[in-house]
Image (spheres, rainbow, N blue to C red):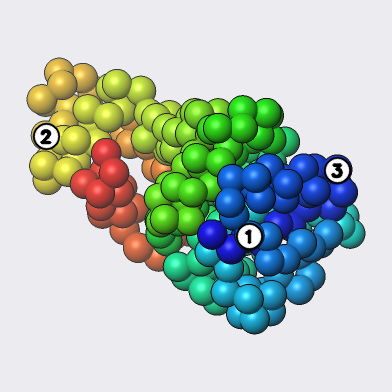
Amino acid sequence: MRIVIVEDSVLLREGIARLLGEFGHEIVGQLVDAGTLVTTVVDLRPDLIVLDVRLPPTFTDEGIRAAVQVRAAAPTQPILVLSQYVEERYATELLASDSQGIGYLLKERVADVADFVDACERVAAGGTVLDPEVVAQLLARRRRGPFDDLTPREREVLGLMAEGRSNVGIARHLVVSDGAVEKHISSIFSKLGLATSDTEHRRVLAVLQFLQHG
């Protein structure tokens, strides 16, 4: 397996290189930043890229942004991202189009040599390896959708709207006043981000969202 490592810490970079070398893998490139990563991939066509999320010059998200760029240029390029923290936004973007050949591990997992080498080999073979903490945070974020903010009664009202019932029909079905139904619907529109200025009919948009994601 031919590998490119992108890591600014010389100790960690050399440690990863030596570790993978001991397992019979070839390190064909070592970069301290992501500035030339795309061209390096084009030139070397490695079997795997192992890169840190936070790289020079700002040590914020250069690595993960570079990973997204690499996958845009070479969609099948296997990449294993190492991070001290879970960068939800870019992790989601990296996994959005195709999760094959993608790994996202917290650096603490590197301490387990066998697991780390296995992760590298699985990602290079087109598999997906996600740190349990990454999965937990991404799932938590996914659960925090607009429909989760609706109360049980608001979800019931929206379901009746989806059935095509009018406000009067909803009120009769729930045995509540017309005014109560109007308040529920107003709250639904607000929580779904359907402002009064929307040119589309908010009732239709709310129902469409419900049918797609509710």
> Mark 1 is on which residue type?
Glu
- Is 92 drawn above or below residue 183 in the view shown? below
- Is 39 drawn above or below residue 183 in the view shown? below
Q: Please give the residue where the numbered disc 3 appears in the rendered image.
A: 11
Kindly indicate the quadrant of the structure image that contains residue 43.
bottom right
Could you say which is closer to the camera, residue 150 or residue 94? Answer: 94
Q: Residue at x 19, y 35 (%)?
A: 159
Between marks 2 and 1 in the image, the one whose residue lies nearer the viewer: 1
Percent x, y for residue 75? 47, 70
Q: Please give the residue where the numbered disc 1 appears in the rendered image.
A: 26
Q: Secondary structure at mark 2?
A: helix
Could you say which is closer to the camera, residue 107 or residue 1? Answer: 1
Q: Is residue 162 visible from the viewing direction of this image?
A: yes
> Mark 3 is on which residue type?
Leu
Between marks 3 and 1 in the image, the one whose residue lies nearer the viewer: 1
Could you say which is closer to the camera, residue 196 or residue 36? Answer: 36
Between marks 3 and 2 in the image, the one whose residue lies nearer the viewer: 3
Q: Residue at x 68, y 42 (%)?
A: 19
The reply to whether dot 2 and dot 1 touch (C-beta < 8 Å) is no
Image position of 211 (left or right of 149): left
> Mark 2 is on which residue type?
Gly
Instruction: State the CA–CA distance, disc 3 to disc 2.
Output: 69 Å
Percent x, y for residue 172? 11, 25
Among numbered discs 3 and 1, the one appearing first in the sequence: 3
Q: Secondary structure at mark 3?
A: helix
Q: Please give the residue where the numbered disc 2 appears in the rendered image.
A: 169
